[in-house]
Image (tube, rainbow, N blue to C red):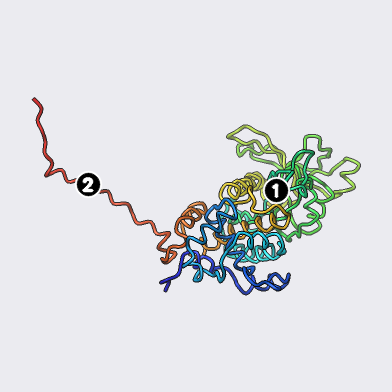
Amino acid sequence: MHEGRTIFAQVMDELPRYEFQKCVDKYRGDHRVRSLSCYEQFLSMAFAQLTFRESLRDIETCLTAVAPKLYHSGFRSRIARSTLADANETRDWHIFSDFAQVLITTASALYTGEDFGVELENAAYALDSTTIDLCLSLFPWAKFRKTKAAIKLHTLLDLRGNIPSLVIITSGKVHDVNILDELPFEAGAFYVMDRGYLDFLRLHRIHCASAFFITRAKRNLQCRRRYSRSVNKKTGLRFDQTVVLTGYYSHRQYPDPLRRIGYCDITTGKDFVFLTNNFLQPALIFPSLYHRRWQIELFFKWIKQHLRIKAFYGTSANAVKTQVWIAISIYVLVAIVRKRLNLPASLYTILQILSVTLFEKTPILQAFAHPPLQLITPNTEKQLYFQGF
């Protein structure tokens, strides 16, 4: 079935080509293109992400080395670094952004029933951002401070499967809380955020959208207790209160009641105070959900360590966003492959195996098969023994 087909081609078979072409046609990505179509550009950048290529010259050299295998992997023209550089600079990054959203929708459907350690039927998302530092002289369009440039990846992570549901790329100057103005909120879903997103006007918009938020309260929070529920302090809970805000501006921005929950982490002894607009779930659910927010930090660490999003092949805003979106697409694609093939290995292990077997002509399941190690017992019957004097 897979005779003569590389593992790279088999992985790329999971891409919905029709949806990709729709994205290309929407932005006229292949208009007047004689060589290196948008799909070949995507394949080249995907190869770079999967094999950790350092530069455009590195990509060109490695693809030239396996030239006989490229045609059956989807390439129809020779990959030259100048052509690839021009494509990254000029072709609209929205092509790859929209296609990444297609893959995200597919992956989210596959991981809908995934257990994430909290007994909750609702969808749950973690919201946070990470900063990628850049050289100001090379990336002047991303000026962050006087002598520094940076971009921010504002990410909404689906905690079921750790799939990025939404990614917004901005300059480093954009404050995290402003992203709440651009998010479409899903009714009934939980949004877990840290204190950087504590803006009562924006939180009230989440409440009006029939969604739920979980965040930490600041120490100077001005509120009045209306009601207290009994809690089991052996579980770490300290109080469970219904409160209303009493600050002049905060009360005008959020006039409805809030739920205030105190919790002490038994292992670390650290105290937390949470704010939420959900009054139905048990109080102990909210510390567990906030603890799962750490998954987004692990996601940022993973993509920075294992994908090429800290060093870029181009210096323009279009080239940077193109590379970031293709990197996210590859992360989601690996997650799709893992689920569809029922692979027990982690995403890290799958990525490492792909990096060294990408152009081998073997069934993809065979590449991830790990035969049990057989311990070889040395045959000592014919060995000579010398008896010392």
Residue nearest the viewer, comparing 246 with 74: 74
Q: Position of residue 245 (x, y in %)?
A: 85, 43
Residue nearest the viewer, comparing 68 with 248: 68
- Residue at x 42% of width, y 60% of height: 367
Q: Amino acid at mark 1?
A: Asp
Q: Nearer the viewer, mark 1 or mark 2?
A: 2
Label 1 SS: strand
Residue nearest the viewer, comparing 296 with 355: 355
Q: Is residue 329 above or below residue 134?
A: below
Q: Position of residue 32 (x, y in %)?
A: 70, 73
Label 2 SS: loop
Horizontal side, residue 195 vs residue 346: left or right: right
Residue nearest the viewer, comparing 47 with 188: 47
Q: Is residue 79 above or below residue 236?
A: below
Residue at image mark 2: 377
- Tell me if mark 1 has few (under 14), some (14-19) or many (20+) residues whose alpha carbon lies within 10 angstroms of its own: many
- Residue at x 68% of width, y 34% of height: 271
Q: Name the quadrant of the C terminus.
A: top left
For residue 128, which numbered disc appears in the image?
1
For residue 6, which numbered disc appears in the image?
none
Q: Amino acid at mark 2?
A: Thr
Horizontal side, residue 47 vs residue 20: left or right: left
- Residue at x 62% of width, y 70% of height: 35
Q: Position of residue 165 (x, y in %)?
A: 67, 58
